[in-house]
Amino acid sequence: MTYRELYDLAVKSLQNADIAEAGLDARLILEAVFEGNRNLLLLDGEKEAPSEKIPGFRELVEQRAMHIPLQQLLGVQNFMGLDFKVNDKVLIPRQDTETLVEEVLIELHDGMSVLDMCTGSGAILISLLNYKNDCIGVGSDLSAEALSVARENASRLLPEEKQKNISFLQGDLFEPVEGKFDRIVSNPPYIPTEVIPTLMPEVRDHEPLMALDGDRDGLRFYRQIIAQSKEYLYHGGMLYFEIGYDQKEAVIGLMKEAGFVQITCVKDLAGLDRVVYGTYL
């Protein structure tokens, strides 16, 4: 079969399974399996595909039709210009979260220390250290499986001289953490429990529940992190959160009650409230 024929069959299969971006996903699977790029269809579409790789291509298409996330199937997600390893043990880094990283980078100066709470794949912390010099980074997560992915990403993506400056700790929030930090950042679980059954099957059925469920009102982890963070921040240190689109007022209120000042909310590229941060004096 030609590349074009395989692509057309894949698109039809994914459309029948109600995959929203069937054409894009079919092309990305094709390029991954046959080790090509956009020119594979444009220039070589009528060429015969290597027969030995066709079964693997069909298997990935079938799995995608079952709504397994494409990033998990391909094992990688680009975030902040870096290709992070992902699997079903970590939350897939979203473009929305790049807004959080970009805001932290503005006030994260060379040589500072940063704690990433609920680090998951390590995407936030690794990105911060990659784009700054001589910063010390610690990532904390309850999941040992997630931390295994984070450590692999750090060793793959950070320059050797920066790898010595990053470490990962397993435990419940601040439980394994010692010392103080200039910046604390977190993209915690923030989806209310009752909302989870309504999520897309890619998220609901295939991403780790513990990285999604923010308890009854979605605010459990904000309460805990805000309450404990002051013990781990230097005076003048800053606390950053990613938030759900409708959680701005609640999170700002919690930070004000805890004594944070200069609290700011930043919107993402879609115009939705996405980041809240404040300063501890």
Image: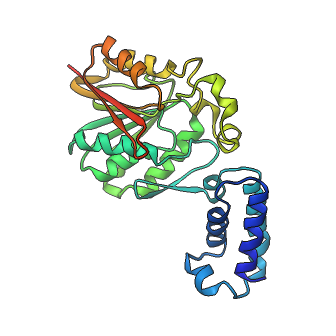
On the picture, is 115 further left or further right than 281?
right
Work out which quarter of the rendered image holds the N terminus and state it.
bottom right
- Count of number-bearing discs: 0
Residue 56 visible at all: no
- Is 125 drawn above or below residue 48 in the view shown? above
Residue placed at 38% from the left, 55% from the top? Answer: 158
Residue 33 visible at all: yes
On the picture, is 77 further left or further right than 276?
right
The location of residue 145, given as percent across then percent down, is: 60, 40
The location of residue 192, given as percent across then percent down, is: 58, 24
- Is 198 drawn above or below residue 52 in the view shown? above
Residue placed at 30% from the left, 52% from the top? Answer: 131
On the picture, is 195 further left or further right than 52?
left
> Looking at this view, is 69 or 148 the one in front?
69
> Looking at this view, is 72 or 69 the one in front?
69
- Is 130 drawn above or below residue 182 in the view shown? below
The location of residue 229, given as percent across then percent down, is: 35, 21
Residue placed at 37% from the left, 50% from the top? Answer: 163
The location of residue 91, given as percent across then percent down, is: 56, 41
- Is 67 drawn above or below residue 259 in the view shown? below
Location of residue 264 (image quadrant): top left
Seen as rendered, the residue at the extreme front is: 271
**Colouring scheme applied when the structure was drawn:** rainbow
Residue placed at 77% from the left, 65% from the top? Answer: 12
Work out which quarter of the rendered image holds the C terminus and state it.
top left
